[in-house]
């Protein structure tokens, strides 16, 4: 983790981990964690299994979307993109600052011989797609449910960032040569503009954008399933509405750097979102731990299997990915 890291990066890693530890301490305090064993026995495990299945399906859809986005450049198998995504997710649970994003791109470059700058460009486009749909989802959710002020602040910051990125993307599409001349001193940016322009010319670019909607909506599935398993629905709050709010808060809040796996940050965000609907904060805190387990354990298992199939150790794969230029 520390190899090759600048002093500033090391300080940021330390700060992110300390903040996550503080969040985890808050989630554990006054959570009446001893009640968790009884709640586990009384859960409706059919809904828990449905939530785990939905969580797996989320990343299968992401792999399908990634294949669509890159289809004008390479004839990829969806199993390749899904495997790369799961290895990247596994790395994100262990390594800081979403290192898995680079690793998954490197794997596709290695397996399918897709130029690494092209794959990295596609990952950037994916994030822009996600940001656009998330802002729309946030706006729709806010119409029906009052959200905490900090969520609105995050949403405005993300909206501004997404707006800037969309503006740059549109500029690349309609004025490619002007954009390339503007950054002619930086060959890497020229290549990025070329790759983005090539993707934007294809119909698959717009199909991938549409595929980003089910990718986002499916992320509500595990949250809704656990709410049903906990029997938290009431006459004043539907399970689907609660799940939508929790999903929005989690997606917006986990944009900022945190400990691997978002441990601590995840629990704080999920518990705070749930207390908009239930008065029992201790129950909300225990729910946050079970939700973290529901979305993390299938990911870890799938990532471990995908990682084993590569025949490499994670640290070795990280070094190889960082060494590619």
Image: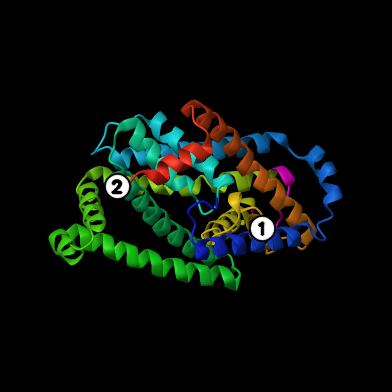
Q: Is any part of residue 276 visible from this angle?
A: yes
Cα distance between the residues tagged 1 and 2: 46 Å
* Quadrant in which residue 41 is drawn: top right
Query: Which residue is tagged 2?
Result: 117
Image point (36%, 41%), residue name:
66
Can you give x and y, in whole percent of width and height, for residue 89 in the image?
Answer: 52, 42
From the viewer's perspective, tell me whether residue 86 is left or right of residue 223: left
- What secondary structure characterizes most of the magenta part? loop
Q: Is any part of residue 236 visible from this angle?
A: no
Q: Considering the numbered disc 2 on the image, is that residue within a helix, a strand or a loop?
A: helix
Image point (32%, 44%), residue name:
119
* Quadrant in which residue 268 is drawn: bottom right
Mark 1 / mark 2, whichever is N-terminal: 2
Query: Which residue is tagged 1?
Result: 237
Image point (58%, 65%), residue name:
145
Eye-nearest disc, 1 or 2: 2
Can you give x and y, in whole percent of width and height, for residue 258 in the image?
Answer: 58, 58
Q: Considering the numbered disc 1 on the image, is that residue within a helix, a strand or a loop?
A: loop
Mark 1–mark 2 CB contact (< 8 Å): no
Tell me where the magenta segment starts and ends, as one range. Answer: 229-238
In magenta stretch: residue 36: no
Front residue of this view, candidates 36 and 194? 194
């Amino acid at each position: 983790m520390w190899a090759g890291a600048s002093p500033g990066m090391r300080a940021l890693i330390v700060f992110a981990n300390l903040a996550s530890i503080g969040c985890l301490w808050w989630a554990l305090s006054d959570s009446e964690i001893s009640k968790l064993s009884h709640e586990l026995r009384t859960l409706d495990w059919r809904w828990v299994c449905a939530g785990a299945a939905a969580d797996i399906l989320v990343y299968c859809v992401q792999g399908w979307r990634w294949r669509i986005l890159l289809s004008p450049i390479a004839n990829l198998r969806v199993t390749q993109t899904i495997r790369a995504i799961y290895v990247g997710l596994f790395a994100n649970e262990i390594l800081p600052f979403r290192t898995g994003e680079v690793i998954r791109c490197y794997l596709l470059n290695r397996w399918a011989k897709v130029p690494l700058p092209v794959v990295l460009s596609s990952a950037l486009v994916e994030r822009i797609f996600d940001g656009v749909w998330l802002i729309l989802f946030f706006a729709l959710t806010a119409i029906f449910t009052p959200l905490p002020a900090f969520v609105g602040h995050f949403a405005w910051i993300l909206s501004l960032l997404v707006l800037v990125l969309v503006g740059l993307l549109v500029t690349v599409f309609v004025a490619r040569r002007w954009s390339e001349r503007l950054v002619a001193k930086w060959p890497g940016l020229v290549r990025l503009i070329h790759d983005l322009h090539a993707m934007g010319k294809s119909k698959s670019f717009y199909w991938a954008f549409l595929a980003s909607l089910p990718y986002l909506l499916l992320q509500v599935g595990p949250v809704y399933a656990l709410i049903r398993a906990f029997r938290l629905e009431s006459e004043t709050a539907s399970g689907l509405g609660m799940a939508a709010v929790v999903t929005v808060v989690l997606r917006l809040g986990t944009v900022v750097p945190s400990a691997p796996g978002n441990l601590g940050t995840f629990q704080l965000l999920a518990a705070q979102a749930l207390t908009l609907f239930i008065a029992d904060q201790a129950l909300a805190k225990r729910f946050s731990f079970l939700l973290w387990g529901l979305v993390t354990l299938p990911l870890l298992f799938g990532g471990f299997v995908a990682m084993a199939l590569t025949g490499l150790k994670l640290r070795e794969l990280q070094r190889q990915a960082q060494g590619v230029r």
